[in-house]
Image: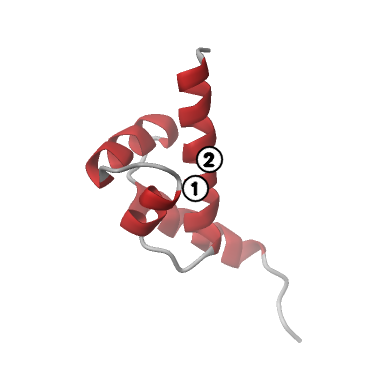
């Protein structure tokens, strides 16, 4: 893996974590992790994780909700 590919992978993993755990929007998160173009971010995110950011985020948040302990 080249240094650029490694950096891209780290940025996308950070974006995925931010989207799954925070209230951030896709455009804001893409800029926060270093992308100037939201469309480029979406393309690379889909390539890395197999789904567009908004769809993957909804899925991850659903998983997080399902795994959270039930309140008494």
Mark 1 lies on a secondary structure that is helix
Height in image: 72 above or below 15?
below
Image-quadrant location for residue 58: bottom left
Give the crowd class for mark 1: few <14, some 14-19, many >=20 residues within 10 Å: many
Are circles 2 and 1 on residues that touch, CB within 8 Å? yes
Q: What percent of the width, then of the height, locates residue 68? A: 67, 68
The numbered dot on residue 61 is none
Height in image: 15 above or below 9?
below
Height in image: 23 above or below 32?
below
Name of the residue lying farthest toward the right: 72
The numbered dot on residue 16 is 1
* Residue 31 relative to residue 2: left or right: left
Q: What percent of the width, then of the height, locates residue 16? A: 49, 47
Asked whether 52 or 33 is in front, the reply is 33
Q: Which residue is mark 2?
A: 13
* Residue 22 relative to residue 31: left or right: right
Give the crowd class for mark 2: few <14, some 14-19, many >=20 residues within 10 Å: some
Quarter containing the C terminus: bottom right
Q: Residue at x 56, y 58 (%)?
A: 63
Mark 2 lies on a secondary structure that is helix
Asked whether 46 or 23 is in front, the reply is 23
Q: What percent of the width, then of the height, locates residue 50? A: 39, 35
* Residue 31 relative to residue 3: left or right: left
Q: What percent of the width, then of the height, locates residue 14? A: 54, 45
Q: Residue at x 52, y 65 (%)?
A: 22
Separation of marks 2 and 1 at Cα, in angstroms = 5 Å
């Amino acid at each position: 893996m080249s240094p650029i590919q490694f950096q891209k992978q780290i940025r996308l993993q950070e974006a995925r974590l931010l989207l799954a755990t925070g209230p951030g929007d896709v455009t804001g998160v893409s800029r926060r992790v270093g992308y100037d173009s939201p469309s480029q971010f979406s393309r690379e995110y889909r390539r890395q994780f197999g789904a567009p950011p908004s769809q993957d985020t909804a899925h991850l948040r659903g998983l997080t909700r399902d795994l959270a302990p039930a309140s008494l």
